[in-house]
Amino acid sequence: MFVEVALDLPLEKTFVYKVGDYVSHEPEVGKRVIVPFGSNDFLRTGIIVDLKEKVEFPEEKVKEVFDIPDDFAVFMENTIALAKWIADYYCASLGEVLFFFLPSGFEITESFRVSLIEENVSKIKLSPSERKIIEALQGRGACKVSVLKRRLKISNFYQSLKNLINKGVVVREEFIEKDSIPKKRFLILKESKALRGAKSKELVEFLERRGKVSVDELKERGFSLAVINRVVKEGVADVVEEKVTVGNRPQELKDLREIELTPSQKKAFEAVTSAESGTFLLYGVTGSGKMEVYLKIAKEFVDRGKSVLILVPELLLTPELRARVESYFGNRIGIFHGKLTQREKVSAWLKAVRGEVKIFIGTRAAVMLPLKDLGLIVVDEEQDDSYKEQQKPYFHAREVAIKRGKREKFPVLLVSATPSVDTYYRVQKGEIEKLELKERVSTVPLPFIKVVNLQDSKRTNIFSKELLTALENTVKKGEQALLFINRRGFFAQSFCPSCGFIAECEDCAVPLVYHRSEKKLICHICGKRYKPVYRCPKCSTRLEFKGYGTERVEEEIKILFPEFKVVRLDQDTVKNPSVGARLIKEIKEGKYDVIVGTQIATKGHNFPKLTLVGILIADLLGGAPDYRGAERIFQSIVHTTGRAGRFKPGAAIVQCFNPDLPAIKFAVEYRFEDFYREELETRSILNYPPFNKGVLVEFQLDKLSGFKKLEEKFRLLKGELSKYFSVGELIPAPIPKVSGRYRFTSFMRALNEEVLLSGIMWIKKTFPDTFRSFRYKIDVEPVRII
DNA sequence: AGCACGCCGACT
DNA sequence: GTCGGCGTGCTC
């Protein structure tokens, strides 16, 4: 018997191994396998992707599997096929995809460690490289070879290290990086025997009753380790280690069937629960009860014995949301997201494998969970960019979910008040069925939105008179206001008013942002911190810290209204989760009058007293100037203004310089269909996605001198590449230098999925050889192209 | 990716 | 002679 194994390597190849007699478990597709690999046969973890009776590969070269450590598969056959699609579509290898999703606690790798044994090296002849290695090892214990190599940057590193080992100065030892699967030890009764000693007798009797008990439980019941060991030694019981999962706390259950559905909610419920497969869009404004509907649909599938996966954006997976889902499904829910610890991830993965949990709620990383009898995937806030992975494999979890539904034959439900332009386009083409919730469940009307043109308005700094008046009235009534700004420290660069000098990051060449709390200039690309310069180094004029960030807004509000209690909610203040949770709690309790915040403040939280939302400069909500700017402005306005008056009537003031932008105009007038129509028209004319499939290629150079060679090679391939893509120029990225590396990008567009797939296949075949000496990234259907 | 090996020019 | 810098082939 042979197995085909995918390893965590950027190679198209899989590897064949022979399965010998001495493996712990039967080979099976999707199981982990430990195999020797490479010149020194280090052990690595792989995934079995196929079973074979015969191999074409010369049999004498086929190595034998070291072990198959589990009696369960960590991937299902279906998800391995799905991983192949991800690999083909998003330009990665099968192994890279599988090991991206598999919690790293499942991985076992073997490597060498070296340590110095001969401290007195003065008498031995040594080359400079060898000396460098010894210096690095001095005063240290064993050091991983890979770590040492990375630190030293010597070209003949391995040769020099070998010389040192031959000279007897350094020793080498293999070691295994252990998996971190939580394990528990159990005693299993083998044969009953009468033992001496009261405690031993008691333990044997207890084992006779229970058969199998964990060592932890025995200890809790007052059996000492000595007694336990004795019973094992006498042959009464065996000790086994088992991989375990950790449970959730039980919660009070709320019965979903009590909720009465409106006619359109009912229609949506019927459509999804009666479908065998297909993609749906649950579409409805704030307050139309989207969540109640999809939870009820989920409940229906669980009642039928199916499992359900609910995907949410990164920022939405708050304790609040979890509590809400738990109130419906109790402790039967599992959580999976990137910020769990290794052990928690492994534990959650095992729960899925064993079917211990029927409902999983998670972020994009959860989309490949090996859920048995999966009957439904819900993608909440489907337009959210956090569904797109920003490293290899650059997959979009919404797309993977849709593919998974098609492959495993179950419905996929996208949910949004402001669908992505992409999804809306597919609704128009009939690929996705729209289920619109027309009635609002909430008795509170949608907030009244007023647009203020900053060019006409009388204003104090960035605050229009209208906004200031509304702010004052709101706080006077004892209610809260949220002032929304796009980014922390936006434009808060140090700027010379006489010569125009702007302090920039020496590595990334972007303007530095002044952070008052730290009294430092910070680069928002690489994070490097600088001492602030107060006088222009060129003309020694006093510098201004210009522009608006959350900090400056907070400060100016405090000056304008010294009696208001102001709180700032942005990346800086909620970086520490416990501080963030405390601030949120305090806001809900009404401890603050004004909240100054970024996107973070608007996602996933309901502030009951919040009745006024002010958007300071709506024109800037698009962030980076790319073809999706309008879409982001539209979504930001709708989401932010929707925060006002969730429980009592509220209002929103949208300040902007250009009130005629379709994204602004249609958002504030609640004319959603008009926005999508006009935006799709623009995209169509300019030939942007969704009318084609975009691919962003980015090259990174250590030295600018390498550009000539890169350009040459790129030009050489361009002809062939143009068979699949319309290829954009190789241009320096708008932020040309990141962490000391120069970035060059080309944006390419393929006509459709079919062409894209063959184009990516060609890239996979060609790029690794052609651009071997270059660092490059290939981001298929990127969410940002700068 | 990570490693081996081989070739070159530039230093002791 | 080494050393450091590439380009290239291979991993079951």
Image: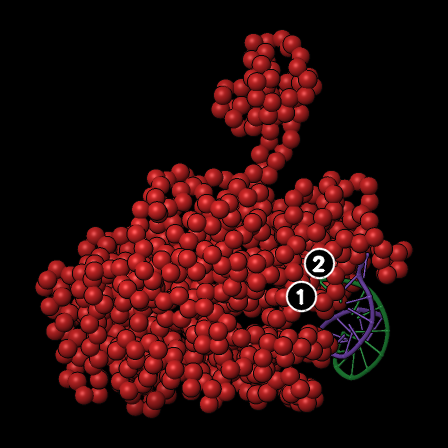
Chain colours: A red, B green, C purple
- Mark 2 vs mark 1: same chain? yes
Query: Which chain is mark 2 on?
Result: A
Residue A379, position as x, y percentages in the image: 45, 61
Rendered view: A269 above or below A250: below
The residue positioned 14% from the left and 71% from the top of the image is A470
Asked whether residue A549 is in view, the answer is no
Residue contact at pointers 2 and 1, CB within 8 angstroms = yes
Residue at mark 2 to residue at mark 1: CA–CA distance: 9 Å
Q: Write down the residue under mark 2.
A: A6
Q: Write down the residue under mark 1.
A: A93
Q: Residues within 10 Å of mark 1 (few under 14, many from 20)?
A: many
Q: Looking at the image, which is closer to me, A612 or A743? A: A612
Residue A189, position as x, y percentages in the image: 64, 21
Q: Looking at the image, which is closer to me, A371 or A270? A: A270
Residue B12, position as x, y percentages in the image: 76, 74
Asked whether residue A659 is in view, the answer is yes
| Amino acid identity at mark 1 | Ser
The kind of secondary structure element at disc 1 is loop
| Amino acid identity at mark 2 | Ala
Residue A745, position as x, y percentages in the image: 56, 82
The residue positioned 51% from the left and 64% from the top of the image is A278
Rendered view: A219 above or below A637: above
Query: Which chain is mark 1 on?
Result: A
